[in-house]
């Protein structure tokens, strides 16, 4: 969704680390907020689905850990502004956990 509102410029190559660093430092704040919102929504629904399938809330935490590790690899590979690196690393676990809690609450009333 972020790419729809803020498309990647044609003059920046994803293979050039310096160009990517400059681009990431220049992205508008709203693009970063949309990115974080997408991370949060993805983690929430990932935790929700994992917990609904397994009937255990702890599976949501595993989803959060996997997403956090993937995000750390992303942040190391593509330079991000410091605040975005920190917040994007923190966002996955709590939202995946919330998704797991929501699945547990909803499946308890169904069964």
Image: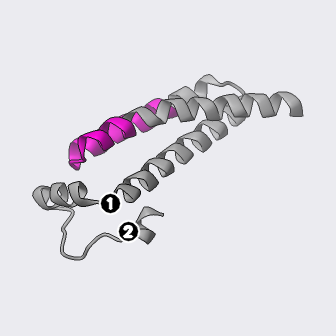
In the rendered view of the protein, which quadrant contains the C terminus?
top right
Rendered position, 16 above or below 106: below
Query: Is label 1 or label 2 in front?
Result: 1
Rendered position, 17 above or below 36: below
Q: What kind of element bears circle 1?
A: loop
Question: As drawn, is 85 to the left or to the right of 34?
Answer: left
- In this rendering, the count of numbered labels is 2
Rendered position, 57 above or below 28: above
Residue nearest the observer in this picture, 14 or 6: 6
Q: Which x, y percent locates residue 25? A: 21, 54
Rendered position, 20 above or below 4: above
What is the CA distance from the residue labelled 1 to the residue labelled 2? 9 Å
Q: Which x, y percent locates residue 90? A: 41, 32
Q: Residue furthest bottom?
A: 10
Q: Mark number for residue 28? A: 1
Q: Residues within 10 Å of mark 2 (few under 14, many from 20)?
A: few
Q: Residue furthest left?
A: 18
First in sequence: mark 1 vs mark 2: 2
**Picture quadrant of residue 109:** top right
Magenta residues, start to end: 63-88
Magenta residues: mostly which secondary structure?
helix
Q: Which x, y percent locates residue 98? A: 62, 31
Q: Which x, y percent locates residue 48? A: 65, 38
Identity of the residue drawn at 72% across and 34% down = 103
Question: As drawn, is 95 to the left or to the right of 24?
Answer: right
Question: As drawn, is 68 to the left or to the right of 38?
Answer: left
Q: Is residue 105 magenta?
A: no
Q: Are marks 1 and 2 in contact (CB under 8 Å)?
A: yes
- Display coloring: one colour
Residue identified by numbered label 2: 6
Q: What kind of element bears circle 2?
A: loop
Q: Residues within 10 Å of mark 1 (few under 14, many from 20)?
A: few
């Amino acid at each position: 969704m972020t790419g729809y509102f803020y498309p990647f410029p044609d003059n920046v190559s994803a293979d050039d680390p310096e160009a990517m660093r400059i681009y990431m430092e220049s992205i508008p704040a709203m693009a970063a907020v949309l990115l974080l919102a997408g991370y949060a929504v993805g983690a929430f629904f990932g935790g929700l689905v994992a917990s609904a399938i397994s009937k255990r809330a702890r599976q949501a935490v595993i989803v959060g850990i996997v997403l956090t590790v993937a995000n750390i690899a992303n942040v190391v590979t593509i330079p991000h502004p410091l605040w975005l690196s920190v917040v994007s690393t923190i966002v996955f676990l709590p939202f995946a956990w919330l998704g797991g809690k929501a699945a547990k609450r909803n499946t308890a009333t169904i069964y």
